[in-house]
Amino acid sequence: MRGDRRQIQTAVLGSADSEEPLLLPLEAIELDAFRRRHQRDTFWCGLLLGGCGAQLTTKLYTDRVCHFAHYPGPDGHPHLCGRSARGVASADHLYVKAAADAWLRDRDTQAGFDFVQPDGVPIGSIVDIQLPHKKLRVHLDREVEPDWDAEHEPVLGVSVPVDSDTLIRRWYVHRIRLDSEGTARRVRIGTEAFARPTEWFALNECEITDRGLSTPAVERIVQARSASPSTRWTPGQKQEESAQDVQAHELMRRVLYARRTESTDLAEEVCREITELSGVSPQLQRQLDAAWRNALAWMKKETEARRELFAHLNQAVAGQKTRSIKTLLTEIKTATRDGRSEEEEHTLREAAASLAALEAAKLACLDTLLEDISRLPANEDPWRLRSEAEQLFHAATEVGKIGRHRRAQLNLWRTRLRYLPSKPRPAPPSRPQERVPLHQQVGRAYWTTRPCPLCGADRGQQCVFDGGPRVGRVREVPHADRLQPVVDELQEHQKKQGTVRTVWRAYDVPCPHCGQEAGAWCLTPGEPHSTRSKEARRLNEQQEPRL
C-alpha cells in the first residue's frame, strides 16, 4: 500500500479508540496557542475516524496550512495509513454525537448512538440516534440514499439532495450542517420546505416532539398547512379573478423562480413590474407587497455578496495568491452567470491575465531549478542534493499543470532522493574523507573575485537566488559555477608546487560495469556499481593523483 500524502486535519484525544474529536488550526499563529493548550495531551489517528490507531504529531508551516502527521516508522520511512477521510469534516460524526448527547441530557432524555455502515460504506457517513419513542438517522454525505418510508426520520447533510415531490408530500425535511469555530465544530439544524429557503437554528432552539425533531420553522409550517382557508369554493358559485389579480399571482411566481435560479436581473425586473401594477385586491396586495420586500432584501444580500467576492479577488491579485485567484474566478463565474457589468468583466480579465502571468513565472522558476539540479555532478555533497531537491519539490506544488516531461524529471529525483541519507552519518575511519564543498576550499576573500555566470552578480557582489520562493535574496555561499574556476586555479598551483593530494570517489572514475563516464550516474536508481567503488578505492590506496 502506498502512503497517503493528503493532509490530516482531525484527530482524537487520549487514545486510538477515543470519541473526543479535535480539529487542528490551519494557521501557524493559532497552532502555537493550540500546542500550549494541549501540551500534556496526545493526538491519535482514531479508529472511529477510519484511521490506523497510531499516534500523531502536529506540523507547523508558515507557507501552507498546518496539519497532523504520523510519526515515521522504525526504519525512518513514512508511516503508511489507509485512512480515507482526512479533511476538516472527517470527524463530523463524532461532533454530531457529542453535541446531540449534551443537548438531550439537558432535556433529561437518554439516547443511544451508533455509527452504522450499511453495505460497507465508510464510517462516519451515518449516525443513528435512538430516542425513547423515535429514531433519527443523520446522513452526513451521499453514500447512503435516505429511506423516507422507514421507521427512522432522516436528517440530511447539506450535500444530500431531496426532490420536490418529497418536500410536498412530507411538508418539510430537516438538514444538518457543521461550522468550524476554533478547534471545534458547531452543529446547526435546518428546516427546508417546498418553495421556502432553508431556515437554520442552533441545536438548543430545537425540540423533540411527538412528530420527532422540531424547529421553530416546523411550528410555522404545520400551523400554516393546518389552518382553514379564509374562503372556500362552493358548487354553483363561480370564482372569478380580475386581470390585475391574475397578473399579481404571475409576478409572485416569477419572484420565486428568480430566487430559485439566483437571477438578480429577473428579480429586479419583476420588482419594477410590481411597483407599476395597480388595482389588485387588498388581500392579494398585502401578499404582493411582502413578496416585493423579500425580493429587495434578497437582491441587496446577493449584491453585497457579489461585491465581496470581487473585493476578495482584487486582494488575491494584489497578494499574488495563485490558488485563491483560481478559486475565486470559478466562484465568481458561477455567481454571475446571469450577466456581468463592464467593470466586472474588466476585473475578471485582469485577474485572469495576472493568474496566467503568475503561473508562467512559477513554471519558469521550476524550469530553472530543474536545470540547476541537473547540472550538479553525481558525486555532489548529498546534503546539498537533498536541499536542492526539496526546494524543487516545493516549487512544483505551486504550479498547476507542469507537463509530462517535467513530471518525469521530478519523479526521477524523488527516486534518487530515497537513496540519499536522511540524517548526517559520520564516515567510518577506514573510508576516505568526504569531498570538501567548494566554498570551504577557497578563502572568503576570493569568493567574489569573478562575476557569477548564473545569477549575473558582478565582481565584489554576492550571489543571489535566481529561482524558487527566495528569488532575489542573497545566498549564504556563491554558486558552484562561480567558485569552480577559482578552485581549479588553486589546485593547478598546488600541483605545480607538488603539495596536492586528492581523494578518489566512486563517481570520479568511469564505471567498468555499465560504461558510464566519470561524473555521470550509474544506470541504477541508487548506489553506484560495486566495481566502480572498488576502482576508486584502488586508486586511493595507490595514491594516484587526479588529473
Image (tube, helix red, strand yellow):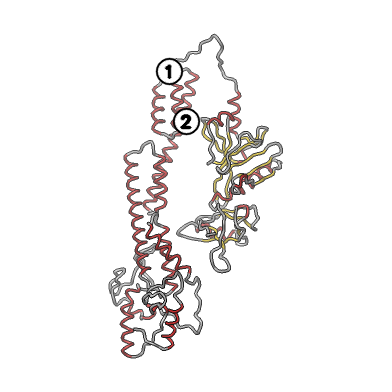
Q: Quadrant of the C terminus?
A: bottom left
Residue at the location (50% across, 85% down)?
430
With 251 as the anchor, is 178 left or right in this view? right
Q: Which mark is residue 294?
A: 2
Q: In the picture shown, does residue 8 fall above or below 258?
A: below
Label at residue 520: none
Looking at the image, residue 279 lies above or below residue 153: above
In the picture, residue 432 is in which quadrant? Answer: bottom left
Residue 244: numbered disc: 1
Indicate the position of residue 480 as horizontal and vertical percent values. 35, 74
Amino acid at circle 2: Asn
Circle 2 residues within 10 Å: few <14, some 14–19, many ≥20:
few
Numbered disc 2: secondary structure = helix
The residues bearing labels 1 and 2 have C-alpha atoms spaced at a distance of 21 Å
Q: How many marks?
A: 2
Q: In the rendered view, would you say 153 is above or below 444? A: above
Q: Nearer the viewer, residue 510 or 490?
A: 510
Q: Pinpoint residue 117: horizontal percent, then vertical percent.
A: 62, 46
Image spot of residue 25 (x, y percent): 53, 55
Ranked by sequence position, the earlier of labels 1 and 2 is 1
Q: For the point 56% across and 31% down, which residue is it?
A: 166
Horizontal and vertical percent for residue 261?
44, 34
Q: Is residue 384 above or below residue 63?
A: below
Name the residue nearer the viewer: 507 or 510.
Answer: 510
In the rendered structure, the answer to whether residue 48 lies left or right of residue 290 reads right
Q: Amino acid at mark 1?
A: Gln
* Structural crowding at the residue carrying mark 1, measured as other residues with C-alpha within 10 Å and reported as few (<14), some (14–19) or many (≥20): some
Closer to viewer: mark 1 or mark 2 = 1
